[in-house]
Image (tube, rainbow, N blue to C red):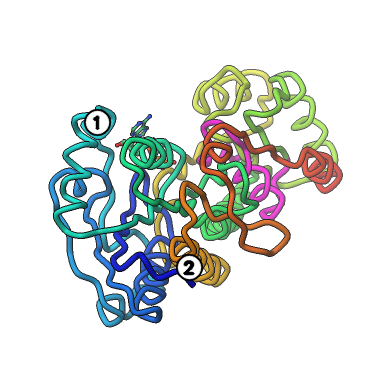
Amino acid sequence: MDKKIKKIGVLTSGGDSPGMNAAIRAVVRTCAYHGLQCQGIYRGFQGLLEGDFIELGPRSVNNIINKGGTMLKSARCKEFMEKEGREKAYQHLKDANIDALVVIGGDGSFKGATTLHKETNIPIIAIPGTIDNDIFGTTHTLGYDTALNTVVEVIDKIRDTASSHNRLFLVEVMGRDCGHIALNAGIGAGAEEILIPEENLGVERLLESLRRSKESGKSSSIVVISEGGKIGKTVFELKEYVEENLSEYDVRVSVLGHMQRGGAPSCFDRVLASRFGVKAVESLMEGKSNFMVGLRNDQIELVPLEKAIKGSTKVDMELLRVSDIMST
Ligand code: ATP
């Protein structure tokens, strides 16, 4: 391997997601394994702008593989959107003799990373870390599997109340632009209906489906709704509409919110983070740059960062059919 790179910086940016710590650990330990130095950068691009760095060795990342959030903290940084801000950040990288960067975050962070690379030529590899699973070029982003398990666990609990009181629960989950969480967690939790941004089911079809569900003898119903669902009503407006039109239903709303982002990463996310971290560092050592590491056909591959930013992910619409059949 070409060992021109001596020191790698690592940062987490945008929304935190479970598995980010495991990815930091993997980057730090892969650096140590190959005799490279590693510098942690606090609070994403904000810390880069301020030169807020910390030397990380293999023992600095003990006991973090099982922790949610990110030990390096995360932030959103407006100043980094401006060229002057990025110039300041680059100066700090040069001052600290950092030769290359690993950026862990979502597509906004990738835009910042690729712009910095183009302006300064600093080698960068990105690791997709977001619970939404909305990054092109990888079947899984870090944190997505954990979020799915969290949502399923919570809906299982909601189901206990729903069935004890013959209630209908509208459960809103994260996913502004894509329905991966709603669709997969919905099927996993046995939801009667799933509303995702990719398909406008329409309120009338939802009412019809709930009517059928009641007639078929079901004692409770769960409808899982992506926060970006296109039904044209907020989840609270939907509750009122359903109660007005289906008086037999006692409706409750549960907005799961930020709990979906937290918690210990699943085993899947820990393994994925470890594989992503190794690939990111070794790719930089091989002279690769401006790529994202992604999971495809159970292999870790490099995806051009531009493609990861511009491409869009698609939910498997066959899953909607599976959900329909399962709610019979
Ligand atoms: P999440 O998926 O959780 O939202 P994200 O990485 O997409 O994560 P953003 O807030 O969109 O989160 O972006 C994180 C940071 O990346 C921004 O605060 C900003 O500093 C930087 N960034 C985003 N877009 C750009 C851009 N076009 N140019 C330069 N920097 C950018």
Label 2 belongs to which residue? Answer: 282
Which amino acid does the dot numbered 2 rest on?
Glu
Q: Quadrant of residue 53?
A: bottom left
Q: Is residue 57 left or right of residue 183?
A: left
**Vertical comparison of 34 with 265: above or below:** below
- Tell me if 310 is positioned left or right of 31 in this view: right
In the picture, residue 167 is in which quadrant?
A: top right
**Residue 130 among those drawn in magenta:** no
Residue 314 is left or right of residue 267, and the answer is right
Q: Residue at x 34, y 72 (%)?
A: 28
Q: Is residue 156 above or below residue 290?
A: below
Which residue is the site of mark 1? 78
- Return the x and y of residue 200 as percentages of the image width and height: 70, 23
**Mark 2 and mark 1: span between their CA atoms?**
31 Å
Image quadrant, ligand 1: top left
Picture quarter containing residue 24?
A: bottom left
Q: Residue 291: which numbered mark, if any?
A: none
- Measured as percent of width and height from the top left, residue 31 is found at 36, 73
Picture coordinates of residue 258 (x, y %)? 39, 47
Q: What is the magenta range? A: 168-192
Q: Is residue 22 visible?
A: yes
How many marks can you see? 2
**Label 1 beta carbon less than 8 Å to ligand 1:** yes
- Image marks 2 and 1: residues in contact by CB distance under 8 Å: no
Task: Judge: label 2 CB < 8 Å from ligand 1.
Answer: no
